[in-house]
Each structure stands twice: as C-alpha cells, then as structure tokens.
Image: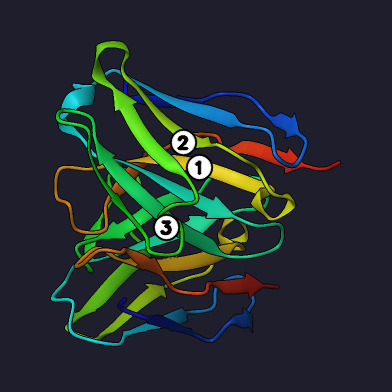
Amino acid sequence: AIQMTQSPSSLTASVGDRVTISCRASQGIRKDLGWYQQKPGKAPKLLIYAASTLQSGVPSRFSGSGSGTDFSLTISSLQPEDFATYYCLQDYDYPLTFGQGTKVEI
Amino acid sequence: EVQVVQSGAEVKKPGESLKISCKGSGYNFANYFIAWVRQMPGKGLEWMGVVFPGDSDTTYSPSFRGQVTISADKSINTAYLQWSSLKASDSGMYYCARRGGAASGDFDYWGQGTLVTVSS
C-alpha cells in the first residue's frame, strides 16, 4: 500500500498567518491527491482535489500544489474557522490511504 | 441537491451482527462510487473500501477485507457496511462518502457519520 506521510503532525498558528502542510507519498501518485478538513464531531470536508483544484465553495485562501510524491496545502491567511485537522488522501491506487493528519491549533 | 445520509448510532454486544446504511439522493446513485471510512476515537481517518453501485463491484483495504462486507442496492440508492460478528475493537465512527467524477481524491459529499459502540 502507498504510505502517505504528513508533516507536521500539529502546528500552532495565529489568525492571519500563512500555514503550509506537507504530504509525501511513498511512491509517485501523479496528481491523484485530495485535501480534507475535519472539525471536532464533524465529517471531513473536501477542500482540494487533483492536488490543486479548489472544490466549489471553498475559500480561495486555500491552495494545493505538487505532483508525483510531494504535495502541500497552503492557507494564505489563517481564519478562526480554519482551526481544524487536515488530512491528505491518495486516490492513485487501491487501497486508498490517508495521511495521519495535521492539527492546526491556536 | 446532493445528499448522503447515514443510519443512526448503534449500541451492540460483542458477537452480534450489524448492518449500517448510507442513502444517496439528488444524483444518479448508480454512477458514483461510495467509500466507507473509519475513525476510531481520537484517531485519524482509515479508508475501508469502496463499492460501485452500478454493478456492485467492491474493493477492500487489506486491513478490513474479511472483517466487514460492503454492498449496495442501486434500486433504493443505498450502500451498506456490515459485520457478522462484532468485536469491541469495531467501536468507532463510520463515514460514507461519494467519490466525485474526477476520481482524483474528490470525495465530495460525506454522510454525517454513524457511531458504533460495541460493549458487553
């Protein structure tokens, strides 16, 4: 199975900060990667798919980049509602696999 | 409007069977994969498997193959996750999610989750 390694596992930031989360695949996955946000007690929410395509309705402060094995999610100016846990998901080969998550805290 | 709605919370005893459901509406249910994702308390997301309702073709994660059964009934727009003999370690939150048309990491609609508690 393809392993997805996210870093950091957690980070502390302030409103207005620029935040970047990384995800590395154990083998090349083209651009078959999605990013998800999960708040406590809620289902995950799709932010980015195909590594860099913004899901409809998601604020433009979220962006994704990368291809092959290295990917990143950037929040250009952190807002109070962005404090959550973020996951990457590779959709290149079965079994699909998530990263372990990055918790963004104040 | 696309919606994915899961069945309610369950409390079961070890050894009991269970089948939880995920109903899609507002789109052609047969044409979109449905995945199941587990989240243990305080832990991350685990992809369990996927079903294509159009032909009921199913793929499992090796971690869950043989432990659960994933199925779908396109006539009633519903996917299922079932256990034949629950264990305490099956306790957790289970989500279903629709895989979007790009099939590139785009699970775009998620159910609200079904909490399964297995305890004697």
Residue closer to the observer: B4 or B13: B13
- Which quadrant is the C terminus of chain B positioned in? top right
Task: Measure how far apart labels 2 and 1 are at the Cα level.
Answer: 10 Å
Residue closer to the observer: A31 or B117: B117
* Figure quadrant of residue B64: bottom left
* Residue pointed to by mark 2: B81
First along the sequence among labels 1 and 3: 3
Q: Residue B95 bears which disc, if any?
A: 1
Q: Is residue A49 left or right of residue A4?
A: left
State the SS at label 1.
Answer: strand
Question: Can residue A19 be seen by looking at this rendering?
Answer: yes
State the SS at label 3.
Answer: strand
Q: Is residue A8 left or right of residue A2?
A: right
- Which quadrant is the N terminus of chain B positioned in? top left
Q: Residue furthest top?
A: B75
Tell me the residue at 59%/55% (across/down). Answer: B39
State the SS at label 2.
Answer: strand
Q: Position of residue A3 (x, y in %)?
A: 36, 81
Tell me the residue at 62%/82% (across/down). Answer: A11
Type of the residue with mark 1:
Tyr
Q: Tell me the crowding category of disc 3: few under 14, some 14 to 19, or many 20 or more residues within 10 angstroms, Cα based.
A: many
* Residue pointed to by mark 3: B47
Q: Nearer the viewer, mark 2 or mark 1?
A: 2
First along the sequence among labels 2 and 3: 3
First along the sequence among labels 2 and 1: 2
**What count of labels does the image hold?**
3
* Figure quadrant of residue A38: bottom right
Q: Nearer the viewer, mark 2 or mark 3?
A: 2
Task: Measure how far apart labels 2 and 3 are at the Cα level.
Answer: 13 Å
Q: Are marks 2 and 1 on the same chain?
A: yes
Residue closer to the observer: B13 or A6: B13
